[in-house]
Image: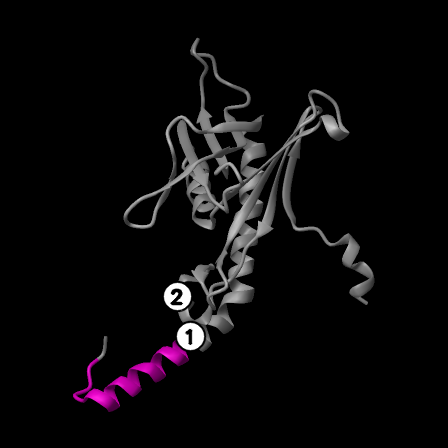
């Protein structure tokens, strides 16, 4: 039954669009491995094959120069925690809010450049003249490339002066329209956790309990950690 419908399956959570722009939030969530069961969402190396992340995809489309090949598409990711932080700002009716992120990742190309994303989500209730904005929220996203540098503790950052922008898009939203996007995403994340995390938590806690008992039996005296 479901095999015939595979071509129609979409991971879109919520969409807002105007005549020239569109923003879509997509499901890119992954549950944690049972060995890290308490983390709920995946962001660890499970079996040595690589890291599995749990994200919400943010896709911006800019049709201002036309459709088809003229459409600008920008892709960035945010974490479930980012979504809940934004949701808290919305429900608290925060006058000013800002979330800004720059990420560099992936393997470098033959010239040493790695993919990069930039994201800025801002709420500003009034303009420079003190007038109330009808669309106080603005999402700006950018894709580009830069040369990655690594810190001593394993972090990664873009070498100064090497960033090259490839494409950029933005969209402005009202309080209600942005709340609709984020509220739907919060509800989906909650349902995801309620659906996929319980068996992982059960298996993980059982394994953790067995590990403690083995340690207690081996090292005596017994002690809970």
| Range of residues picked out in magenta | 204-223
> Quarter holding the N terminus?
bottom right
On-image quarter of the C terminus: bottom left
Q: Position of residue 20 (x, y in %)?
A: 69, 24
Residue 100 lies left or right of residue 17; in this view the side is left
Expressed as whole percent of the image width and height from the top left, the position of residue 38 reads 39, 66
At mark 2, the secondary structure is helix
Q: Is residue 138 visible?
A: no
Residue 136 visible in this rendered orientation of the protein: yes
Determine which residue is flagged by label 1.
Answer: 204
Residue 19 lies in quadrant: top right
Where residue 199 sits: x, y (%)?
Answer: 51, 73
The residue closer to the viewer here, 50 or 205, is: 50
2 left or right of 53? right
Q: In the rendered image, which residue does mark 2 sit on?
A: 38
The secondary structure type at the circle numbered 1 is helix
Q: Residue at x 47, y 59 (%)?
A: 42
Give the crowd class for mark 1: few <14, some 14-19, many >=20 residues within 10 Å.
Answer: some
Number of marks: 2
- Image mark for residue 7: none
Residue 28 sits above or below residue 75 on the image: below
Position above or below: 41 against 1: above
Depth check: give the residue in front, 224 or 108. Answer: 108
Q: Are marks 1 and 2 in contact (CB under 8 Å)?
A: yes
- The residue depicted at 45 percent of the width and 71 percent of the height is 34
């Amino acid at each position: 039954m479901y095999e015939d419908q595979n071509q129609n399956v979409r991971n879109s959570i919520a969409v807002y669009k105007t005549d020239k722009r569109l923003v879509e939030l997509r499901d890119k969530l992954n549950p944690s491995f049972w060995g890290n069961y308490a983390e709920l969402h995946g962001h660890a190396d499970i079996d040595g094959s690589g890291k599995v992340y749990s994200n919400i995809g943010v896709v911006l489309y800019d049709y201002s120069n036309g459709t088809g090949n003229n459409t600008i598409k920008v892709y960035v990711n945010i974490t479930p925690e980012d979504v809940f932080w934004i949701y808290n700002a919305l429900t608290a009716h925060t006058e000013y809010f800002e979330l800004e992120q720059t990420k560099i990742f992936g393997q470098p190309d033959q010239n040493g450049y790695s993919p990069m994303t930039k994201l800025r989500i801002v709420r500003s209730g009034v303009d420079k003249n003190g007038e109330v904005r009808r669309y106080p929220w603005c999402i700006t996203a950018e894709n580009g490339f830069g040369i990655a540098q690594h810190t001593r503790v394993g972090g990664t950052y873009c070498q100064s002066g090497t960033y090259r922008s490839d494409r950029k898009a933005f969209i402005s939203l009202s309080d209600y329209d942005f709340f609709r996007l984020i509220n739907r995403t919060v509800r989906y994340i909650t349902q995801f956790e309620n659906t996929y995390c319980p068996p992982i938590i059960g298996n993980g806690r059982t394994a953790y309990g067995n590990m403690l008992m083995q340690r207690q039996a081996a090292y005596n005296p017994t002690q809970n950690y």
